[in-house]
Image (spheres, coloured by chain):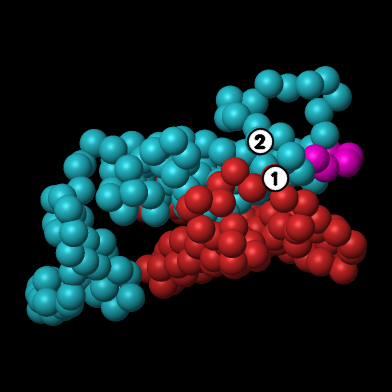
Chain colours: A red, B cyan
Amino acid sequence: MTTILKALEPFADPVSLLLLGAGLLLWFWGTWPLLEAGSYLSKLHKLSVSDTLGSTLMLLGLLVRIPGQWPLLCLALLGLLVWNTIFGYVLARCSLPPQQSEPAAAARLASPTLRP
Amino acid sequence: MGFLLSCLLRLVLWGLLTAETSAINLLIGLALAVLLPHARGPRQPLAPLLRALWGALVAIPVSYGEALSLIRGGGDEERWLEQPASAPSQRLVIFLEVLAITLTPFTLVLGLSRVEGRPIYRIHQLRPRPSTPNPADTRRIEP
């Protein structure tokens, strides 16, 4: 295992930079639509790309760069994936008008109220 | 089984947080995992739970593929869908299913409803506009 890690050491820096750069690109791609005139939910879809997936790539980049800190970085990775996603769900659910949160209102799902 | 899984998850989180594998530290973690309050409710069957966990893990690479499709795609198409859900009494399975669906950038869960007695997820979908009509595996709700 140590031999494999030693052999991979020269690639750690470029791989880490690649992951950090890809994460940064996703950040910008997902954040930019917030300034545009899309619907609230479409912004939320795109924000999940930057917020969850971009940040995950960045944490993976940090994991490759500083493998000694793996326990905390793995904890951050787990927390990010789970809570960011569930927070997105909470935001999406709270965006519905109160009457649509009720189970009996499923038939009214196609309401255009959330569209601009 | 739910109790054991919950203890195991707490112990793993404790281990990652403290980054120490000494016996005394693991004992403290185990004591905390057992003593902290546990959720009460019906028994959680293991097989659907493992299936949902696998689904949540598979959703991670899938979500990167969907993100790339969204980045590459021209115009986007928004739709409202409904998809069959597991029984609401299986709380952990529901949690993992919501996680898997919401993690993928194409879909967001808006809630859990009952239609004709069956539990369903209400889903908002955003995906690149297909050049040809693509029959979805979930039923579309027409406005």
Q: Position of residue A113 (x, y in %)?
A: 76, 58
Tell which subunit mark 1 falls on. Answer: A
- Labelled disc at residue B54: none
Report x, y in % for residue A104.
50, 50
In the image, what residue type sits under mark 1? Ala
Q: Is residue A71 visible?
A: yes
Q: Which chain is home to disc 2?
A: B
Q: Residue at x 50, y 62 (%)?
A: A86
Segment tinted magenta in the rendering: B73-77
Circles 1 and 2, Cβ within 8 Å, touching? The answer is yes
| Picture quadrant of residue A33 | bottom right
Determine whether the residue tagged by mark 2 lies in a helix, strand or loop: loop
Residue type of the residue flagged with mark 2: Ile
Q: Is residue B75 magenta?
A: yes
Q: Residue at x 64, y 62 (%)?
A: A96
Residue at position x 80%, y 40% in the image = B77
Between residues A89 and A16, which one lies in front from this camera angle? A89
> Where is residue A18, by image quadrant?
bottom right
Q: Residue B25, percent across and down?
A: 16, 78
Q: Is residue A11 left or right of residue A63?
A: right
- Secondary structure predominantly adopted by residues drawn in magenta: loop
Question: Does A115 sit left or right of A70 as displayed?
Answer: right
Q: Nearer the viewer, residue B138 or B143?
A: B143
- Identify residue for label 1: A110
The CA span between labels 1 and 2 is 7 Å
Image-based side of B61 in relation to B98, left or right: right
Q: Which residue is mark 2?
A: B141
Q: Indicate whether residue A30 is drawn in magenta.
A: no
Element on which disc 1 rests: loop
